[in-house]
Image (spheres, rainbow, N blue to C red):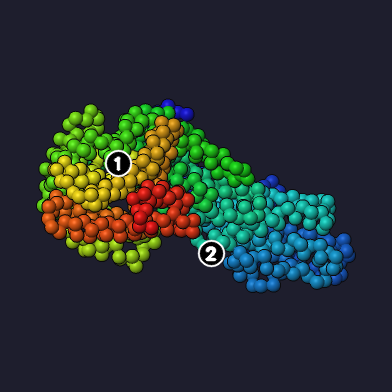
Amino acid sequence: MNSENPADCEPEMECEVKSEMCQIISSSDFMESTDKLKSTSETRFKHNAGSWKFESVGGFFLATEDVSKLSLRKQEQVLIRDLIYAFSGVPSSHIQPEISLDEIPYLTTEHIDKVHFKIDERFTGAFRTLANELLPLIGYYISVQSFIEETSLTRNCSRFLGNALQKDMQQYFEFQATLETQLNEQKLNLRQLVQQVRPWLPTMQSFASLTSRVRRLEPNSAQLLSLIDEQQQHFKSERLRQLITDISRYYMTMVQLWTQKGIIYDVRGEFFIEDTSANAMSSTLLSPKQCCHAYWAQRYRLHVDRLPTFLEPLAERILLAGKYLNVLRQCNVHMNLMQETLIYVPKEMEEAPHEQLIRSSYQLPARKLLEVLVQEQLAEHLQNLQDYFLLQERNFIDALLAKCAQQLEQNVDNLQPEKLQRITQDALQLSSNPHKHLLRCQLMDCDVATQLGNRLKQKLITREASSEMDTPSSQLSEQLTLCGYEAFTLRYEPKWPISLVIHEAPLEQLQLLHRVLFYLRYVQHQFQSACHAGVIPNLRASELRRRMIECIEQLEQHMIMDVVQPRWQKLLLVVQQAQLVDEVLQHFQSTLDQCLLLCLLCEPVIFVRSLFILGQQCLNYSSFMEQQATSADFDAGVLEYEEQFNSQLSDILDLITDLARPGSNCGNEERASCKQLVQRLESIGKDLR
């Protein structure tokens, strides 16, 4: 590893990057012309710009012997000579294709194997049978060589493939020259020729198949690498394995620079990650307001069509490795950067070398970033969310309700957010929490059921861009009035870099939980206030009040004690034990998702609506007892409220009982949570079932 300060080394790093990438580009673009071979026969096989066209060969034209008049020995020598010429694109009067010569270079992958060449029938049948096995090599060669010639002057990615193939074809030409030398020295018979040429057949077949597909698809660089990788897996060719290693070197160097330096140097627009910031080489000039989760979530744009298939399983790690390096630069963190060469060598093993290196490149900044967040007291901030949003800080919520309960009875349009914020700050005065100043109050513009419906709609739009889900938006118009206790919630405004973890998305989920819990606690507070006011109802009224309070308490206790508390404690434990920042991020999100799911605050919103209807009935009954405790119609009113409460409680019990059944659509955890809630409410509704 190379010890560097990511925040200070960017100018030197940029020079190194440009130098390194220029070397790769020049080595990829430039192909030296083939060296002259020593013998004139070798030279002949290197200049076939017009494959399979009659031309002067070695200063003389090919002979057209009458094969039928030759001896078997002479026939064999003539056939070997013509085969050697044909294998390098030189025509022969005794070997001809069955289709037009101009069609051969443009045949598709599935048709290249169907090109048939015929041997003059005047050759002995045994010779023709033995040589027929080698004839497909002629079509393979023509397809590959024509591709090399066509792409030699182009500027697209196919040129790199052509240059790389030219290196392999040089070995093929040398092999052909060796065969001719053996023939001239009379050391080669037809059977020996077949044995020596046979290993080249699958290699040239794989090359021809590849070039034909590239011709047809016209891929970009990533798609070209994917094609080569697919071909090498299919043909199990060592030459193709080496080919993709060579051609992918430029792309893998871009991956290396990004994962080990956090820098994108992509002059051709071929990398699958695009930095959308104006100053892509530096992230240290951001103001504190600019640097937030939203900025980092939107800064890097992914182009999946520029991602080779062999890197798809590693795409997220590649993205996060460079992203976290730049986040650490923004935090002005000193660390040791990796300096390891990254190449792609296909391996049939559990984890290839390039996978190990990318994993290490990701783990280094992910581990360091977690250290930074822990030093910034991430655990304390998460504890704050539990204390204030999930009502674990009882002194605060009691003080808050004591100060603003009456105001929250008003319509939300009549409330003053600034006044509520002052009350919230007053309620926090006795707290010694060092981060209490980050807490704010907020008034939402819709009820919880509508907010849940809108969240579902947004998820569906994001997932499948569906235009059929319009019902959630209509719920807003159904909300004719919204009281303060239904709209009130909290907001948390952490500073950088804690805002990388605690941002708008998880806070919205926390607000959903808080709104329901706050509503339940508000209902309990109103009952307590009515009792303290000296209201003395009759026995039936007192029993109904007790059942209502117990029901609301059990609903709240189920959410807090059965669902939220154990999972939040596990989250705080994960923060202490985690090695990488993504372990915390994933568990934080999983905790919020589970809490919403197990508290039945997901679709369908029937439970949420029923819960708020039940709470409103309790609030109405509390107000009724204060106003009409001595009224003559009091008993009839109590009976009416009892019937409404029993009916609503029965509906809720039926709903959660159905969800708790083994045949329901719920998961095991959700069914278990519903069973817990049923057990808590059964004693209250035992006379209803």
Label 2 CA crowd tier, 10 Å (few <14, some 14–19, many 20+): few
Considering depth in this image, is 106 or 285 the residue closer to the camera? 285
Point out residue 576 in the picture as x, y percentages from the top left corner.
41, 31
Point out residue 572 in the picture as x, y percentages from the top left corner.
38, 34
Q: Residue at point 16% right, 54% down?
A: 624
Q: Residue at point 45% right, 58% down?
A: 665
Dot 1 or dot 2, earlier in sequence: 2
Picture quadrant where residue 639 is located: bottom left
Residue tagged 1 = 390
Residue type highlighted by circle 1: Leu
Considering depth in this image, is 459 or 646 the residue closer to the camera? 646
Look at the numbered discs 1 and 2 and tell me whether their residues touch, using CB distance below 8 Å: no
Considering depth in this image, is 480 or 15 the residue closer to the camera? 480
Image check: 206 left or right of 523?
A: right
Point out residue 513 in the picture as x, y percentages from the top left corner.
30, 47
Residue tagged 2 = 216
